Protein backbone atom coordinates (compact mmCIF):
# COMPACT_ATOMS: atom_id res chain seq x y z
CA UNK A 1 0.00 0.00 0.00
CA UNK A 2 1.42 3.36 -1.01
CA UNK A 3 1.86 6.13 1.54
CA UNK A 4 -0.84 8.23 -0.20
CA UNK A 5 -3.42 5.43 -0.01
CA UNK A 6 -2.60 4.77 3.64
CA UNK A 7 -2.81 8.46 4.48
CA UNK A 8 -6.11 8.69 2.60
CA UNK A 9 -7.59 5.76 4.49
CA UNK A 10 -6.44 7.19 7.82
CA UNK A 11 -8.05 10.51 6.94
CA UNK A 12 -11.33 8.78 6.07
CA UNK A 13 -11.19 6.89 9.37
CA UNK A 14 -10.61 10.13 11.31
CA UNK A 15 -13.51 11.86 9.59
CA UNK A 16 -15.75 8.85 10.29
CA UNK A 17 -14.79 8.87 13.99
CA UNK A 18 -15.48 12.59 14.23
CA UNK A 19 -18.87 12.29 12.56
CA UNK A 20 -19.78 9.43 14.88
CA UNK A 21 -18.84 11.35 18.06
CA UNK A 22 -22.20 12.26 19.60
CA UNK A 23 -20.83 14.92 21.99
CA UNK A 24 -20.54 17.58 19.32
CA UNK A 25 -23.90 16.89 17.71
CA UNK A 26 -25.57 16.85 21.12
CA UNK A 27 -24.22 20.21 22.29
CA UNK A 28 -27.35 22.24 22.93
CA UNK A 29 -27.85 25.84 21.86
CA UNK A 30 -28.74 28.54 24.37
CA UNK A 31 -30.93 31.59 24.04
CA UNK A 32 -30.99 33.80 27.15
CA UNK A 33 -33.55 36.60 26.91
CA UNK A 34 -33.63 39.24 29.63
CA UNK A 35 -36.15 42.04 29.98
CA UNK A 36 -35.18 45.30 31.72
CA UNK A 37 -37.16 46.31 34.83
CA UNK A 38 -39.98 43.88 34.05
CA UNK A 39 -41.96 43.01 37.17
CA UNK A 40 -43.38 39.83 38.69
CA UNK A 41 -46.93 41.09 38.06
CA UNK A 42 -46.50 42.41 34.51
CA UNK A 43 -46.94 39.31 32.31
CA UNK A 44 -50.10 37.33 31.61
CA UNK A 45 -48.42 33.95 32.31
CA UNK A 46 -47.85 35.32 35.84
CA UNK A 47 -51.41 36.57 36.14
CA UNK A 48 -50.23 40.06 35.19
CA UNK A 49 -51.87 42.94 33.34
CA UNK A 50 -50.09 42.71 29.96
CA UNK A 51 -51.26 40.04 27.51
CA UNK A 52 -48.16 38.38 26.03
CA UNK A 53 -49.23 35.46 23.80
CA UNK A 54 -45.69 34.43 22.84
CA UNK A 55 -44.42 34.28 26.41
CA UNK A 56 -47.62 32.42 27.29
CA UNK A 57 -46.73 29.90 24.58
CA UNK A 58 -43.15 29.70 25.87
CA UNK A 59 -44.48 28.99 29.38
CA UNK A 60 -46.92 26.40 28.00
CA UNK A 61 -44.04 24.67 26.21
CA UNK A 62 -41.79 24.60 29.29
CA UNK A 63 -41.41 25.50 32.96
CA UNK A 64 -42.45 28.61 34.90
CA UNK A 65 -40.63 29.57 38.11
CA UNK A 66 -42.54 31.21 40.95
CA UNK A 67 -39.56 31.84 43.27
CA UNK A 68 -36.83 33.02 40.89
CA UNK A 69 -34.77 36.11 41.70
CA UNK A 70 -32.34 38.50 40.12
CA UNK A 71 -29.12 38.74 42.14
CA UNK A 72 -29.31 42.55 42.06
CA UNK A 73 -32.21 44.98 42.35
CA UNK A 74 -30.86 47.31 39.63
CA UNK A 75 -29.31 46.80 36.18
CA UNK A 76 -25.50 46.54 36.27
CA UNK A 77 -25.16 44.33 39.37
CA UNK A 78 -27.55 41.67 38.05
CA UNK A 79 -25.70 41.67 34.71
CA UNK A 80 -22.31 41.24 36.41
CA UNK A 81 -23.71 38.31 38.41
CA UNK A 82 -25.36 36.77 35.37
CA UNK A 83 -22.17 36.96 33.27
CA UNK A 84 -19.88 35.49 35.96
CA UNK A 85 -22.21 33.16 37.89
CA UNK A 86 -20.95 34.83 41.07
CA UNK A 87 -22.34 37.45 43.40
CA UNK A 88 -21.59 40.74 41.64
CA UNK A 89 -19.91 42.05 44.80
CA UNK A 90 -17.00 39.76 43.92
CA UNK A 91 -16.56 41.61 40.61
CA UNK A 92 -16.97 44.85 42.58
CA UNK A 93 -20.07 45.92 40.68
CA UNK A 94 -22.49 46.29 43.62
CA UNK A 95 -24.27 49.28 42.04
CA UNK A 96 -25.09 50.89 38.71
CA UNK A 97 -22.28 51.85 36.31
CA UNK A 98 -23.34 55.48 35.78
CA UNK A 99 -23.54 57.45 32.53
CA UNK A 100 -22.42 60.60 34.34
CA UNK A 101 -18.60 61.01 34.03
CA UNK A 102 -18.53 62.99 37.29
CA UNK A 103 -19.31 59.82 39.22
CA UNK A 104 -16.63 57.31 40.20
CA UNK A 105 -18.66 54.34 38.99
CA UNK A 106 -18.66 55.76 35.44
CA UNK A 107 -15.12 54.38 35.18
CA UNK A 108 -15.97 50.93 36.50
CA UNK A 109 -16.77 47.84 34.47
CA UNK A 110 -16.53 44.08 34.20
CA UNK A 111 -12.77 43.60 34.43
CA UNK A 112 -10.92 41.30 32.04
CA UNK A 113 -9.94 38.83 34.77
CA UNK A 114 -13.59 37.86 35.28
CA UNK A 115 -14.61 34.60 33.60
CA UNK A 116 -17.93 34.76 31.76
CA UNK A 117 -20.14 31.94 30.47
CA UNK A 118 -19.67 33.40 26.99
CA UNK A 119 -15.91 32.94 27.21
CA UNK A 120 -16.15 29.34 28.38
CA UNK A 121 -18.72 28.45 25.74
CA UNK A 122 -16.81 30.19 22.96
CA UNK A 123 -13.59 28.42 23.99
CA UNK A 124 -15.39 25.11 23.63
CA UNK A 125 -16.58 25.85 20.09
CA UNK A 126 -19.78 27.83 20.59
CA UNK A 127 -20.65 30.79 18.45
CA UNK A 128 -21.65 33.61 20.82
CA UNK A 129 -23.52 36.90 20.47
CA UNK A 130 -25.10 39.66 22.52
CA UNK A 131 -27.70 41.98 20.99
CA UNK A 132 -29.05 44.69 23.29
CA UNK A 133 -27.98 46.21 26.59
CA UNK A 134 -24.55 45.55 28.10
CA UNK A 135 -24.27 48.08 30.98
CA UNK A 136 -21.03 46.62 32.30
CA UNK A 137 -18.67 49.45 31.39
CA UNK A 138 -18.67 52.50 29.12
CA UNK A 139 -15.20 52.23 27.65
CA UNK A 140 -14.20 50.09 24.66
CA UNK A 141 -11.90 48.01 26.89
CA UNK A 142 -15.06 46.81 28.68
CA UNK A 143 -16.88 45.96 25.45
CA UNK A 144 -18.57 42.53 25.38
CA UNK A 145 -16.32 41.43 22.49
CA UNK A 146 -13.60 41.27 25.18
CA UNK A 147 -15.78 39.10 27.43
CA UNK A 148 -16.44 36.11 25.19
CA UNK A 149 -18.93 37.46 22.65
CA UNK A 150 -18.12 37.06 18.96
CA UNK A 151 -20.77 39.62 18.02
CA UNK A 152 -22.22 42.71 19.69
CA UNK A 153 -24.87 45.14 18.50
CA UNK A 154 -26.45 47.39 21.05
CA UNK A 155 -25.66 49.88 23.78
CA UNK A 156 -23.42 50.01 26.82
CA UNK A 157 -25.37 52.47 29.00
CA UNK A 158 -28.47 51.90 31.14
CA UNK A 159 -30.94 53.07 28.51
CA UNK A 160 -31.08 54.77 25.11
CA UNK A 161 -33.73 56.53 23.08
CA UNK A 162 -35.45 53.62 21.33
CA UNK A 163 -34.94 55.36 17.95
CA UNK A 164 -32.01 57.78 18.11
CA UNK A 165 -30.02 55.53 20.50
CA UNK A 166 -28.83 58.47 22.58
CA UNK A 167 -28.28 57.67 26.25
CA UNK A 168 -29.64 59.66 29.18
CA UNK A 169 -26.44 61.72 29.43
CA UNK A 170 -27.03 62.92 25.84
CA UNK A 171 -24.30 60.68 24.38
CA UNK A 172 -24.79 58.57 21.25
CA UNK A 173 -24.65 54.93 22.31
CA UNK A 174 -25.15 52.24 19.64
CA UNK A 175 -22.29 49.90 18.85
CA UNK A 176 -21.19 47.39 16.29
CA UNK A 177 -18.55 45.41 18.15
CA UNK A 178 -16.35 48.02 19.89
CA UNK A 179 -17.08 50.84 17.41
CA UNK A 180 -19.94 53.34 17.54
CA UNK A 181 -22.24 52.73 14.58
CA UNK A 182 -25.81 53.95 14.13
CA UNK A 183 -28.52 51.60 12.90
CA UNK A 184 -31.97 52.81 11.90
CA UNK A 185 -34.74 51.19 13.86
CA UNK A 186 -36.60 50.68 17.13
CA UNK A 187 -34.28 49.05 19.67
CA UNK A 188 -36.57 46.07 20.30
CA UNK A 189 -36.89 45.37 16.55
CA UNK A 190 -33.12 45.64 15.96
CA UNK A 191 -32.42 43.16 18.76
CA UNK A 192 -34.86 40.69 17.23
CA UNK A 193 -33.59 41.16 13.66
CA UNK A 194 -30.00 40.48 14.71
CA UNK A 195 -31.13 37.50 16.78
CA UNK A 196 -32.97 35.89 13.86
CA UNK A 197 -30.01 36.39 11.50
CA UNK A 198 -27.56 35.01 14.06
CA UNK A 199 -29.63 31.85 14.54
CA UNK A 200 -29.89 31.40 10.76
CA UNK A 201 -26.13 31.91 10.31
CA UNK A 202 -25.29 29.45 13.09
CA UNK A 203 -27.87 26.75 12.41
CA UNK A 204 -25.11 24.17 11.84
CA UNK A 205 -23.01 24.78 14.94
CA UNK A 206 -23.67 25.23 18.66
CA UNK A 207 -24.49 28.80 19.65
CA UNK A 208 -25.17 30.92 22.71
CA UNK A 209 -27.32 33.97 22.09
CA UNK A 210 -27.83 36.57 24.82
CA UNK A 211 -30.66 39.04 24.24
CA UNK A 212 -30.82 41.72 26.94
CA UNK A 213 -33.84 43.73 25.83
CA UNK A 214 -34.38 47.41 26.63
CA UNK A 215 -38.12 47.03 27.25
CA UNK A 216 -39.81 48.14 29.42
CA UNK A 217 -37.12 50.49 30.78
CA UNK A 218 -37.66 54.25 30.23
CA UNK A 219 -37.80 56.25 27.96
CA UNK A 220 -41.39 55.12 27.48
CA UNK A 221 -41.58 54.87 23.70
CA UNK A 222 -43.74 52.49 21.72
CA UNK A 223 -42.82 51.27 18.23
CA UNK A 224 -44.93 54.00 16.58
CA UNK A 225 -43.50 56.90 18.56
CA UNK A 226 -40.78 59.32 17.47
CA UNK A 227 -37.19 59.89 18.54
CA UNK A 228 -36.89 62.30 21.49
CA UNK A 229 -33.28 62.51 22.50
CA UNK A 230 -30.52 64.18 20.54
CA UNK A 231 -26.82 64.33 21.27
CA UNK A 232 -26.21 66.97 23.93
CA UNK A 233 -29.91 67.92 23.86
CA UNK A 234 -32.41 68.64 26.62
CA UNK A 235 -35.05 65.99 27.13
CA UNK A 236 -37.28 64.36 29.69
CA UNK A 237 -35.71 61.02 30.72
CA UNK A 238 -39.09 59.31 30.67
CA UNK A 239 -40.08 60.58 27.22
CA UNK A 240 -43.12 62.59 26.25
CA UNK A 241 -45.98 60.12 26.47
CA UNK A 242 -48.60 61.15 29.02
CA UNK A 243 -50.13 57.65 28.95
CA UNK A 244 -47.04 55.94 30.33
CA UNK A 245 -48.94 52.78 31.30
CA UNK A 246 -50.05 52.35 27.70
CA UNK A 247 -46.54 52.98 26.38
CA UNK A 248 -45.11 50.49 28.89
CA UNK A 249 -47.57 47.87 27.73
CA UNK A 250 -46.78 48.54 24.04
CA UNK A 251 -43.08 48.08 24.79
CA UNK A 252 -43.66 44.73 26.51
CA UNK A 253 -45.95 43.55 23.71
CA UNK A 254 -43.28 44.40 21.13
CA UNK A 255 -40.66 42.48 23.09
CA UNK A 256 -43.09 39.57 23.32
CA UNK A 257 -43.41 39.57 19.51
CA UNK A 258 -39.60 39.42 19.37
CA UNK A 259 -39.62 36.35 21.63
CA UNK A 260 -42.18 34.83 19.26
CA UNK A 261 -39.96 35.50 16.23
CA UNK A 262 -36.94 33.92 17.89
CA UNK A 263 -38.92 30.82 18.89
CA UNK A 264 -40.42 30.60 15.38
CA UNK A 265 -36.94 30.82 13.84
CA UNK A 266 -35.72 27.94 16.00
CA UNK A 267 -38.76 25.92 14.94
CA UNK A 268 -38.38 26.75 11.24
CA UNK A 269 -34.74 25.59 11.28
CA UNK A 270 -35.50 22.42 13.24
CA UNK A 271 -33.46 23.60 16.23
CA UNK A 272 -36.17 23.74 18.93
CA UNK A 273 -35.40 20.38 20.51
CA UNK A 274 -31.71 21.18 20.74
CA UNK A 275 -32.14 24.67 22.20
CA UNK A 276 -32.69 25.78 25.78
CA UNK A 277 -34.51 29.12 25.87
CA UNK A 278 -34.53 31.08 29.14
CA UNK A 279 -36.49 34.24 29.77
CA UNK A 280 -35.89 36.41 32.87
CA UNK A 281 -35.89 40.04 34.06
CA UNK A 282 -32.90 41.89 35.53
CA UNK A 283 -34.81 43.33 38.52
CA UNK A 284 -38.33 44.14 39.62
CA UNK A 285 -40.56 46.79 38.08
CA UNK A 286 -40.68 50.42 39.15
CA UNK A 287 -44.10 51.91 39.95
CA UNK A 288 -44.99 52.21 36.23
CA UNK A 289 -45.21 48.43 36.10
CA UNK A 290 -46.45 45.78 38.53
CA UNK A 291 -44.78 43.42 40.96
CA UNK A 292 -48.10 41.73 41.70
CA UNK A 293 -48.53 40.89 45.38
CA UNK A 294 -44.91 41.71 46.24
CA UNK A 295 -43.74 44.61 48.40
CA UNK A 296 -41.45 47.28 46.96
CA UNK A 297 -40.03 48.15 43.57
CA UNK A 298 -36.81 48.15 41.58
CA UNK A 299 -33.92 49.23 43.79
CA UNK A 300 -35.25 47.72 47.01
CA UNK A 301 -34.41 44.48 48.81
CA UNK A 302 -38.09 43.69 49.32
CA UNK A 303 -39.33 40.90 47.07
CA UNK A 304 -40.62 43.44 44.54
CA UNK A 305 -37.03 44.51 43.88
CA UNK A 306 -35.72 41.09 42.93
CA UNK A 307 -38.34 38.34 42.59
CA UNK A 308 -38.88 38.24 38.83
CA UNK A 309 -40.42 36.08 36.09
CA UNK A 310 -38.41 33.12 34.79
CA UNK A 311 -39.58 30.86 31.99
CA UNK A 312 -37.50 27.98 30.61
CA UNK A 313 -38.31 26.03 27.46
CA UNK A 314 -36.56 23.05 25.88
CA UNK A 315 -39.10 20.95 23.98
CA UNK A 316 -38.70 17.23 24.59
CA UNK A 317 -36.47 17.87 27.63
CA UNK A 318 -38.48 20.14 29.95
CA UNK A 319 -42.04 18.98 30.64
CA UNK A 320 -44.54 21.20 28.85
CA UNK A 321 -46.65 23.44 31.07
CA UNK A 322 -44.69 22.56 34.21
CA UNK A 323 -44.22 24.84 37.21
CA UNK A 324 -41.66 24.96 40.00
CA UNK A 325 -41.46 26.77 43.33
CA UNK A 326 -37.73 26.07 43.76
CA UNK A 327 -35.79 29.01 45.21
CA UNK A 328 -33.48 30.03 42.39
CA UNK A 329 -31.49 33.03 41.16
CA UNK A 330 -29.98 34.53 38.05
CA UNK A 331 -26.56 33.31 39.27
CA UNK A 332 -27.84 29.80 38.49
CA UNK A 333 -27.90 30.39 34.74
CA UNK A 334 -24.14 30.09 34.20
CA UNK A 335 -23.80 26.70 35.96
CA UNK A 336 -26.93 25.54 34.10
CA UNK A 337 -25.48 26.41 30.69
CA UNK A 338 -22.08 24.92 31.53
CA UNK A 339 -23.58 21.64 32.71
CA UNK A 340 -25.86 21.41 29.66
CA UNK A 341 -22.82 22.00 27.43
CA UNK A 342 -20.83 19.33 29.29
CA UNK A 343 -18.30 21.85 30.56
CA UNK A 344 -16.72 21.97 34.03
CA UNK A 345 -17.23 25.00 36.28
CA UNK A 346 -14.18 27.29 36.60
CA UNK A 347 -11.98 26.19 39.50
CA UNK A 348 -10.26 29.46 40.38
CA UNK A 349 -13.39 31.57 40.49
CA UNK A 350 -15.96 29.25 42.09
CA UNK A 351 -19.56 29.82 41.08
CA UNK A 352 -22.18 30.88 43.62
CA UNK A 353 -25.13 29.49 41.68
CA UNK A 354 -26.38 25.94 41.18
CA UNK A 355 -27.24 24.22 37.93
CA UNK A 356 -31.01 24.25 37.38
CA UNK A 357 -30.89 21.13 35.18
CA UNK A 358 -32.15 18.79 37.95
CA UNK A 359 -35.21 21.05 38.32
CA UNK A 360 -35.70 21.57 34.59
CA UNK A 361 -35.15 18.02 33.36
CA UNK A 362 -36.27 15.89 36.32
CA UNK A 363 -38.43 18.14 38.51
CA UNK A 364 -35.98 17.57 41.38
CA UNK A 365 -35.23 19.85 44.32
CA UNK A 366 -32.15 22.08 44.50
CA UNK A 367 -31.84 21.28 48.19
CA UNK A 368 -31.39 23.68 51.08
CA UNK A 369 -29.71 26.95 50.16
CA UNK A 370 -29.32 30.53 51.38
CA UNK A 371 -29.40 33.48 48.98
CA UNK A 372 -28.28 37.01 49.77
CA UNK A 373 -29.12 40.42 48.29
CA UNK A 374 -26.64 43.23 48.78
CA UNK A 375 -25.66 42.13 52.28
CA UNK A 376 -29.07 43.43 53.41
CA UNK A 377 -31.48 40.56 52.80
CA UNK A 378 -31.19 36.80 53.07
CA UNK A 379 -33.47 33.89 52.17
CA UNK A 380 -33.42 30.54 53.90
CA UNK A 381 -36.31 28.30 52.89
CA UNK A 382 -39.57 30.13 53.55
CA UNK A 383 -37.84 32.75 55.72
CA UNK A 384 -36.56 36.13 54.64
CA UNK A 385 -34.59 38.46 56.83
CA UNK A 386 -34.18 42.06 55.69
CA UNK A 387 -32.18 44.86 57.31
CA UNK A 388 -33.35 48.45 56.85
CA UNK A 389 -35.81 47.66 54.06
CA UNK A 390 -37.08 50.81 52.32
CA UNK A 391 -39.65 52.36 54.67
CA UNK A 392 -38.93 49.95 57.55
CA UNK A 393 -35.80 50.70 59.57
CA UNK A 394 -34.23 47.90 61.58
CA UNK A 395 -34.46 44.14 61.31
CA UNK A 396 -37.41 42.39 59.74
CA UNK A 397 -38.13 38.66 59.54
CA UNK A 398 -40.91 37.48 57.25
CA UNK A 399 -42.45 34.07 56.64
CA UNK A 400 -42.95 34.15 52.88
CA UNK A 401 -44.98 30.92 52.96
CA UNK A 402 -47.81 32.77 54.69
CA UNK A 403 -46.78 36.40 54.05
CA UNK A 404 -45.50 36.85 50.50
CA UNK A 405 -46.17 40.59 50.75
CA UNK A 406 -43.72 40.99 53.68
CA UNK A 407 -46.26 42.73 55.88
CA UNK A 408 -45.85 41.09 59.29
CA UNK A 409 -42.46 41.27 60.98
CA UNK A 410 -42.04 38.16 63.14
CA UNK A 411 -38.43 38.79 64.26
CA UNK A 412 -39.50 39.10 67.92
CA UNK A 413 -41.24 35.72 67.80
CA UNK A 414 -38.14 34.05 66.30
CA UNK A 415 -35.09 35.51 68.09
CA UNK A 416 -32.82 32.52 67.43
CA UNK A 417 -33.62 32.31 63.73
CA UNK A 418 -33.14 36.06 63.43
CA UNK A 419 -29.73 35.94 65.11
CA UNK A 420 -28.61 33.05 62.92
CA UNK A 421 -29.61 34.81 59.71
CA UNK A 422 -27.99 38.08 60.81
CA UNK A 423 -24.76 36.18 61.47
CA UNK A 424 -25.02 34.53 58.04
CA UNK A 425 -25.39 37.97 56.40
CA UNK A 426 -22.30 39.25 58.18
CA UNK A 427 -20.31 36.18 57.19
CA UNK A 428 -21.45 36.57 53.58
CA UNK A 429 -20.31 40.19 53.47
CA UNK A 430 -16.83 39.33 54.72
CA UNK A 431 -16.60 36.36 52.36
CA UNK A 432 -17.48 38.22 49.14
CA UNK A 433 -15.28 41.21 50.06
CA UNK A 434 -12.29 38.88 50.43
CA UNK A 435 -10.49 38.82 47.09
CA UNK A 436 -13.02 41.04 45.34
CA UNK A 437 -11.81 42.50 42.05
CA UNK A 438 -10.39 46.04 42.16
CA UNK A 439 -12.11 48.75 40.14
CA UNK A 440 -10.01 51.65 38.79
CA UNK A 441 -10.14 55.11 40.39
CA UNK A 442 -11.68 58.04 38.60
CA UNK A 443 -8.88 59.50 36.43
CA1 LIG B 1 -32.99 47.01 35.08
Image (tube, rainbow, N blue to C red):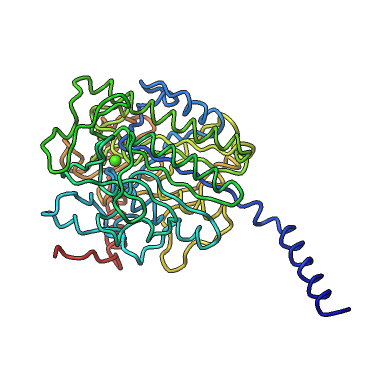
Residue at 59% over, 57% down: 342
Q: Residue furthest right?
A: 1
Q: Residue at x 27, y 55 (%)?
A: 137
State which quarter of the image contains the C terminus: bottom left
From what the image shows, is residue 229 above or below residue 335? Answer: above
Q: How many marks?
A: 0
Q: Position of residue 194 (x, y in %)?
A: 44, 42
**Residue 322, percent from left and from top:** 55, 31
Side (left or right) of 318 relative to 75: right
116 or 186, nearer to the observer: 186
Q: Relative to 243, does residue 435 appear above or below in the rendering?
A: below
The image quadrant that residue 290 belongs to is: top left
Q: Nearer the viewer, residue 273 or 166?
A: 166
Q: Quadrant of ligand 1?
A: top left
Q: 238 left or right of 215? A: left
| Res. 412 in view | no
Q: Left or right: where does residue 253 sit relative to residue 287?
A: right
Q: In percent of the image, x 63 and y 38: which residue is there?
A: 270
Quadrant housing the N terminus: bottom right
Residue 87 drawn at (x, y percent): 34, 55
Q: Is residue 301 left or right of residue 63?
A: left
Q: Within the image, what quadrant is residue 395 found in?
A: top left
Residue at x 16%, y 45% (from the top left corner) = 169
Q: Position of residue 147 (x, y in %)?
A: 39, 59
Res. 429 in view: yes
Identify which residue, 252 or 343, lies in the foreground.
Answer: 252
Amino acid sequence: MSFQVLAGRLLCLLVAVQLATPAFAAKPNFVVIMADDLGYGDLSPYGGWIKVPHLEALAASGMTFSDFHSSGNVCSPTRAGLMTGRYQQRANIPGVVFADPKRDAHYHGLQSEEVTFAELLRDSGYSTAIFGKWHLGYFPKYNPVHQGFDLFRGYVSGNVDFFSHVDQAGVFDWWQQDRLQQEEGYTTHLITQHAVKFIEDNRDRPFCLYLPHEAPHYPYQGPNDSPLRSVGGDFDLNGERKDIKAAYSEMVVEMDKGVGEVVATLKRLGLSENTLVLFISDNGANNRGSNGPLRGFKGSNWEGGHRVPCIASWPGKIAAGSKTDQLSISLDLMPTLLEAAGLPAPQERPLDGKSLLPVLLEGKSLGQRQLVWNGKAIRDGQWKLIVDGKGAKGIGLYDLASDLGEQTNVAKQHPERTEKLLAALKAWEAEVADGATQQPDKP
